[in-house]
Image (cartoon, rainbow, N blue to C red):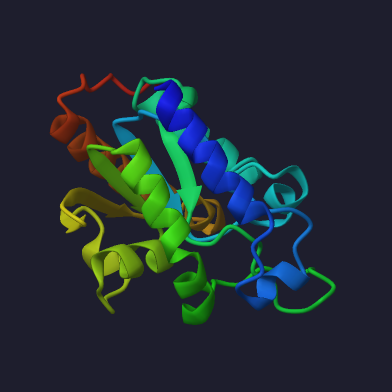
Amino acid sequence: MDDRASTLAACESRVRICRKCGLAETRTTTVFGEGNPAAELMFIGEGPCRREDLTGRPFVGRAGELLTRIIENGMGVPRSSVYIANLVKCRPTVDMKKERDRPPDPSEIEACTPYLDEQITIVKPRVIVALGSPAAKFLLKTSRGISQIRGTWGEYRGIPVMPTYHPSFLLRQAGDQAVVKRQVWEDMKQVLQKLGWPIPAVRKGE
């Protein structure tokens, strides 16, 4: 694991000074990824939001707090035991004021793909969870929306990929939130089964 951690650190040092795309002009800091360097399970989202851009850590805003609950309260494993990253390592914004986020565009994803591929190669996860449509479309090379493909296995470079809704999508739901949460839980149960991990009984309210 020490070798993987040091290799990831070397990759992160290259990301920190990367200027391959325009996001380097508007970022506060790069957001490389975090977690167990030898994780069996890897989560991949689309890109950092404002809080991640300020802290340099992935999934630490409201969506990140929900992802942590999914991992720890739902799947029954510590967040630190998995690895979490994004397609792009800098925050995609709609203007220089960095007031609103947007999905990364194809050129930004292309610029960051070598870094993501290096992370996957180093960590060697047994399963990847694609969080949201941009991540799922990129990893599964599809144009279909997340509502059409969630819960259905695909693969990326030979690794099984489970596409599911991004936590931020769950937060935006009103009347349908319970339905969407149940769908995400069904997806996570498939992930647990694929890994051969026990499926916990979900506590009321989770």
Q: Is residue 151 left or right of residue 7?
A: left
How far across and how far down the image is residue 60, in percent? 64, 40
Position of the N terminus, as image quadrant, is: top left
Question: Who is closer to the viewer here, 111 or 167?
Answer: 111
- Rendered residue at 64%/41% (across/down): 57
How far across and how far down the image is residue 147, in percent? 30, 66
Can residue 83 be seen from the camera position used here? yes
Q: Is residue 142 left or right of residue 46?
A: left
58 lies above or below 70? below
- Rendered residue at 32%/70% (across/down): 137
Question: Who is closer to the viewer here, 56 or 71?
Answer: 56
47 lies above or below 185? below
Position of the C terminus, as image quadrant, is: top left
> On the image, which quarter does residue 204 sit in?
top left
Question: Who is closer to the viewer here, 190 or 39?
Answer: 39
42 lies above or below 137? above
How far across and how far down the image is residue 68, in percent? 51, 32
As drawn, which residue projects farthest toward the right?
Answer: 97
- Rendered residue at 23%/51% (across/down): 161
- Rendered residue at 58%/46% (across/down): 12
Q: Is residue 82 left or right of residue 198?
A: right
Question: Who is closer to the viewer here, 181 or 174?
Answer: 181
> On the image, which quarter does residue 150 sit in?
bottom left
